[in-house]
Every structure is written in structure tokens, then in C-alpha cells.
Image: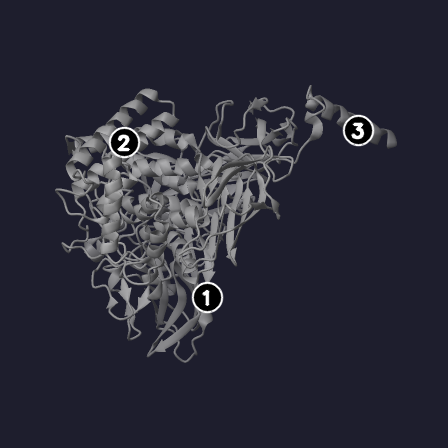
Amino acid sequence: MLKRIILKNWIVAIGIFISLGFISCKDAVLLSKAQDLEISEGFKNPIGFYDANPTFSWKLPVSDNIKSQSAYQIIAASHPDLLPNHPDVWDTQKQVSEQSTWVKYAGKPLKSRQKVYWQVRYWNQNNELSSWSDVQNFELGLLTNNDWKAQWIGLNTAKDSIQGRANTLIHKPQYLRKNFSTSGKVTSAKLYITAKGVFDVYINGKDVSDDVMPPGFTTYDKRIETITYDVKDLITSGQNTIGVELASGWYSGRLLWGNTPWNNTVSPKVLCQLEIMMEDGSKKTVVSDDSWKGNTNGPLQFAEIYDGEIYNANLEIPEWTTNNFNDKKWVSVEVDNLDKKVSVEPKRHHTVKGKIKLQPKSLVQREAAVIFDLEQNMVGVPLVKVPMKKGDTLKIRFAEMLSPNGSFYTKNYRSAHSTDYYIAAKDGNITYMPKFTFHGFRYVELSGFDTSKQPSKDWVTGIVQYSDFDDNGTFTSSHKKINQLQSNIVWGLRGNFFDIPTDCPQRNERLGWTGDAQVFGPTSMFNADVYQFWASWMQSVREAQLENGAIPWTVPDTRGNKIASSGWGDVCVIIPWEIYRRTGDIGFLEDNFDMMKQWVAHHEQMSKNYISNMMSFSDWLQPYPEHGKTKGDTSKNLIGTAFFAHSANLTAQSAEILGKTKEAKKYKELYKKVALAFEQEYFDKDGKIKNVYETQTSYLLALAFDLLSDHKKQNAQKNLLAKIHEADDHLRTGFLGTPLLSKVLDEMGEIDLMYKLLFNETYPSWFYSINQGATTIWERWNSYSKTEGFNPQNMNSLNHYAYGAIGQWMYERVAGIKPLKAGYKTIKIAPMPGGPLTSASASLNTSYGKVLSSWEIIDGKFELIVIVPPNTTAEIEIPADTLESLMLNDKVFKETETLKLIEKTKNVYKVSVQPGNYKFQTKIKPFK
């Protein structure tokens, strides 16, 4: 026995020696392994993955002897036992490179269903070697239509001709099922499934997932996404049953505009393919085909996104997803083949999930109804557990706010009925949660329950639903209302990232408005890990682009016409650029570059002598418009021309990043021509607006997009300040102007004025809505007033994230974290105290690790704590009276190889640092 152990240990030692090869003794140090291995836009060990050419990213561990990476090696294999010594899929060998993000796959071609295992190791700045990382994996889904043996199946629900609101055809939810048998032990079982509609799937009576309304909302005439589930543990030897609930969802439900490229007269259908591997090597495939049976007379009688659900417990079908059910009376399904023009491919971001539970803080009984207050405007559904009597109907209503008399305010829901009904089959407590709808609400009203019972707060739980991403950053400060603003921004994001970036979540709209998306994109990237989310939606934007280069108002396009709007369609340039700046993923620019060029060409097509005549929603919902319009007072042609120049400039910069020098030159020259035309058309020799109405936004566009010569720029800055002072130092900006306000004033050095605008309490301001009780960002600056009531306009969403774009300035300047090089490879830490703030702190999870900037002022002393992650560098600007010493970690600052004083001005120390933790201390001059 002892000889065996000695021999085994000797063999292991030889193996280790061989695996290290000719690595130097210095290499054999074996540093801590790389962490947080991900592929493409941040996926960890995915199944049913969409990308056969992924990129690879990892983070270096936080350690004193790991400042940067000098080289890396990635290996990949078809089986984990082949790693690390025998990778049969890919071996990069040692690559001398600092790159630890978005490394492009260059191994053997990958195919559908293939599972790949991979590891990485790195060498630090001293060429010392790390241990191999933990083994990670990814498994591809069915990548092409040719991988599918299944057919679309469903019942003809269109023949019922039930007309709903707006004369929309209402499709009854379907129940579809099939029995199948297996023999022997199951070693693998993958269910590939999607729907023209939304679905929930069961195997042997067990719900396969907790996904909400899968597969989601895409450009259905171009692409339908599939989802892969690992169902090995649900399959038994012998008889099995698969059952699918199917409803209209976005595919054939009613949307704001009815003339969609798809058609709500088309009945919902499901497509599924269950592939089972047995221990003996045999394979069984169960597909959706004409052998399935269906029924529409189940408990879910009505399910619609805008209008809610009707659930009749008297029609429940016990065990319909099990082997014990007899489906003899069910009817055969109809069958359609896959359309070659529509790609069926794996979903490229996570599904919607129930992410947070909220409990009511209070309840009020009003006659036969009870109102529950969650004290937070949210999006999702209620989980209700209430006592009922047989045959009674529980009515569940929703509202974002209450009217002054305590009644429900639902005018802003417009034609969205947004009500759920539950019909009880027996006396006693019932449990119900809507499945194929969602609501935007703070208040829940119940009626129809057993009134002999005393209502209690545990009758309702708010299930907050949004796409399954995690928080990515934090922000807090010494000011209560700034913290509430941050909370409102985050809750606005959660409420409107429901598979696509929507404008609002409660009324008969909930669409992917492009203008809202482009102004909020950078702020969203700080708050949440939403790169996958944006990458997926931008694919829909590419698919929705028209032949003439136009980008629809909403994506997916629910209109089908060919009119684009400046400032809205520019999302196809702005989002790729802004996301690239925050991720450093050049591949994202590559994916979207052709679309960007086509959009700039559309701008040019819609202009004459470089002056735009494109339709525009303009500076949407500008406060106090002189002309009484929702589009504000800023000239649509001025706006169009400014965005024409801006998109040309960003396209030029993108071309330069991509190494496309000729195109970079072409678009840079175009930008200069448009800028010159803009300046000549709209600005006089004194930098004052001419020919059109003068607004804050007209100056902001010119200054933010760098469209003026130096002399006119200086005067335009003065004129902007005059317009702001004319408004009693209040903003007069709408959707397009507001995000530019902080950027321009910051670049002008008008920090005090920007802080004043931020801290204004009166309308229009960010604090105004907070003072009226807002828990999310509102669509209008004055959606509600405690003294005047609700804004009388029918567009009055109380959950609309556009004005939350101020968050970008809060993180980048109040707290002070900003990318100097794409992806935060070089980080700028430049907090700028002001207003009544005495402290602020922000953290951000970048592609390289956590960044922190946290400052506090106490008795005239400024303290700044900074964390810089490995494989990056940072430039830090510390506010100070520079006649006083700069302290670092309680000692007088001294330059070293890793710490350099870049510049010292009257009010700022500017230093460059390598990765690490730092505490800077200075004396600071008093702020106004």
C-alpha cells in the first residue's frame, strides 16, 4: 500500500513538472488564480448560449504583488479531464498582453449543442505566473433554424373572434401537452423552447423554471429567441409528460399601435425540442408536432399585458401536466413549419425574473375594498393570499398614486385596464399570482374577498420583476434627497428594463422608445450589470432599421411606417459608443458600425446643405413651453442638424477605434461640414441664437456637441448662462436637453450653478417630484403637485426613467468615477464637492474589478478614499488648498514608481496611481 502511495505521488510530481514545461523558476511562483471568468457580455457558465465566437474576460485578484498583467494563456477543451494539459479545442499559448477583457475566440469552429470547458492563467508585471483558474464552461444552444426538427404548434384561437379594447382580437390562453416514454437512465436532457407569444412549461407536473413571460420581446418578423433548460432531473424512466401554457404576450396581444409587422390575428404558437441522452448512448428527441393535443377551456381565461388576467379556479385541470391525465377530449393542434425568413436563435440576455419582494407598509379599508400601500412604485405582479367564498370574484386593481380623496388615480393608465380577476372554486384561502401580464403600481386594491375576515398586510406581496441582472454600482451621500433621487433612478431602471428598455410600465404603451433609451444608457450602466441587456436590444435595433437607414421610434417596431425622429433614432450611434466607453468591448462597435453608417446616411438624406429637416419629437416635455407644445420650443431643424453632426462625429471616432482610417476621415470631414452649416444657420457673430427660438437646449446642443468656433463658443456659454438666470436659475429642458445640462456646465466650470440646479426644490427640478412623494422618476417635471393635483395631460407616467440621466453626473462628478480610457482601463477619479454636501461615495464594478471613490469634508479637511482595481491605472484629482500639504495614508505624499504628481493648481492636486487602496487628505477651501 505504501509503495502505491509513493508511486502515485511520484507520478503526480512528474506530471506537474511536465505541465510547467520550460517555464522559468521565476514563473513557478504561482500567484493566486484569476477570478470572475466570463464570456462575451458577461455570461458565467451559460447553457443554450447564443455565440459560437465568444470573447473571454477575467479579473486579476486583489494583491500587493499583482498590479498588472503582462501575459495570459487561455485553454479550452471538450471535457474537463483534458484540462489543463491536453486542451483539444483551443490553446492560445502564452500571449504577451495586458488584455484581460474581450479576448476573441480563435480555436476550432464551434457548433450547436457543443459544450466547452476553459481555464485561464496570467503572468503579472514581474512575469510571475499564476495558478490555473477554476474550470468554467459554456454550452451552445441551437444556433440555426436547421437544428430544429420541431414545428410550430398551437390552436386556432383567432377563430373565436373575441374583440377587446381598441378592437383588438383577444386570444384565449392555450394548454398544450404530450406524453412520451423513455427507458433506462437519463444522463442529459435539454429542452429548447420558444413561442410566438409567452409560455410556461412543465414536465411531469413540475414547473421547469421561474422565468417571467419568456421568451421576451424581439423583432418577431426577423428573430424569435429560444431558451434552453436543463431538465435532466425532471425526466423519469418510463412515462413522462410535457405541458405548456401559452398566451399572446407581445406577439399577438394589443400594443399601442395595431399595424405591427406581425399580426395579432395570428394565433400564438409554441416550438419545443426535448433532446434526451441515455446512459447506453442512445438519444431520444421529443418535438412539438401534430401528435400534441390542446385545450383552451382552462382556468386562465384571459391574459393580456395591458389589461390583466382572468383566472377561474372552477376550470382548473388537475394533473394535466402529469401522466395521470386523460387528454382524450382534447383536440389535435395545428402545425406550421419554421419560416426561413425569421431566425430562431438563442436568447442573448437573461429572462425576466421575480427579483425583489415588497411587503405593504399600510392598508386602508374603503367600504368593501381594501387598499395596500407598498410605499414604492414598482413593476411586476402581486402575490395574493386572501380568504374567499366559493363563486366570488376577487378584483385586483393597481395605481401608482391615490387621488386626494383616497381613491385610485388611474387616468394615467389610459386604456390599460390593468386589473386581475380570480374566481374562487371553494371557500377558504386562495393563493394567486398573475403569470402572463405585469403592472406598474404602488397601491393594490382588493375587493370581492370574504368580508367576514379582517384584512391584514400579509394578504399582498409585491413581486418586483425585471430582466435578471444584478446591481453594478452604488451611490450615497450626506443629503437625504440626493439619496432619494438615487433610489428613484434605480427603481425607474428596474421598472423599465422588462426584457426591453421601455418608456413606462403601466399604461397602454410600455414600448422600446429609442429617445428615452439613448439619454439613460450611461446612467443605467453604472447602476446595473446591463451590458447583455443593451447588446441584445441593439440587435433588435439593427433588425428594425429600415432600408433607407431610418431607425423607428420604438424597437421592436410596433408601427410599421418609415418615419424617424432626430434624437431618437440617434440611439443607434450613441448607445454603441457609450457602451463601448464603459466596457471597452471593441466587438460591440464592430457589431453596430454598419448600422451607424446607414443612420448617418439617413441624416444626410433628410437634410439640405447639411441642415436637417427630419421629423423630431424635439426637446420632449420641456417645462413652460412658450408655444404650448409637448415638443418644446427648440427648433426641430436645429435639433436634427445638431444630432446629425454628433452622430457623424461619433461614427468617425468609432471608425478610428476600429482601424478604419478612410471612413474615420470621411465622417470627421462630414461632422465638420455639418457643424459649420449649423453655426452659420443658427448663430450670429456674437454667439447668439438666430433664425429660431432661443432656448437653453439650443445652446446646450451646440456646446455639448462642439459645433461652434472658439469665439462663438465663449459667447454662447454666456448666453446659456443668461437663459438659465432668466429662468431664476432653473432648468427649462426636456428629454434631449436635460442630459446635456450637467455636462456643459461642468465643462464651463460652472459647478456651483450645476449644484444649484440639482438642489433646487421648486418646479422644475429633480427635488420637486421628491417633495411631492415620488419614489421613481416621473415622465413630467410636474406630473403631480400636492397643491394642484395631477397633471391633466393623459401622458403622465409616474415611472419614466429619462430624467434619471442626471445620475451620470452624480456618479462621474459628485462622487467622481469616470472612464478616461474605454472600459475603465484608465480611470479618472475627480470628485467635485459642492452645494450642501459634506460627503459622497460611489462604487462601480468594472471589467477589471471594483472602483471606489468616497469623500468626506470634516472641519475643512477633505478625505478621499480610492480603490483602483488590478490591471488599470487612475488619475486622481483631489480638491485642496494646495498651499497645504497633500497627505497619503496619513503621511506626506511622496512620489514613487507607482505614485506620480501630474499637476498642482491653485485648487487641485492631480496624481497618477497604480492599483491599490488609497486615503488622501487635504485642507480644502470653503465652498459657496
Q: Secondary structure at mark 2?
A: helix
Please indicate whether residue 728 sits to the left or right of residue 141 in the image.
Answer: left
Say few, some or many: other residues with alpha carbon within 10 Å of mark 3 (under 14 / 14 to 19 / 20 or more): few
Mark closer to the observer (3, 2):
2
Residue assigned mark 1: 359
Q: Amino acid at mark 3?
A: Lys
Q: Nearer the viewer, residue 278 or 835?
A: 835
Q: Nearer the viewer, residue 460 or 901?
A: 901
Q: Quadrant of the C terminus?
A: bottom left
Q: CA distance from mark 1 to mark 3?
A: 59 Å
Mark closer to the observer (1, 2):
2
Q: Amino acid at mark 1?
A: Gln
Q: Quadrant of residue 339?
A: top left
Q: CA distance from mark 3 to mark 2?
A: 66 Å
Residue 737 appears in the picture as rendered: yes
Which residue of the protein is positioned furthest toward the front in this rendering? 883
Q: Secondary structure at mark 3?
A: helix
Residue assigned mark 3: 8
As drawn, the label of residue 491 is: none
Residue 65 spot, x, y in % from top left: 65, 35
Residue assigned mark 2: 648
Q: Amino acid at mark 2?
A: Ala
Mark closer to the observer (1, 3):
1
Q: Residue at x 17, y 43 (%)?
A: 689
Q: CA distance from mark 1 to mark 2?
A: 49 Å
Figure check: 271 above or below 309: above
Residue 13 spot, x, y in % from top left: 77, 26
Q: Nearer the viewer, residue 370 or 829?
A: 829
Figure check: 133 above or below 245: above
Tag 2 or tag 3, which sits nearer the N-term? 3
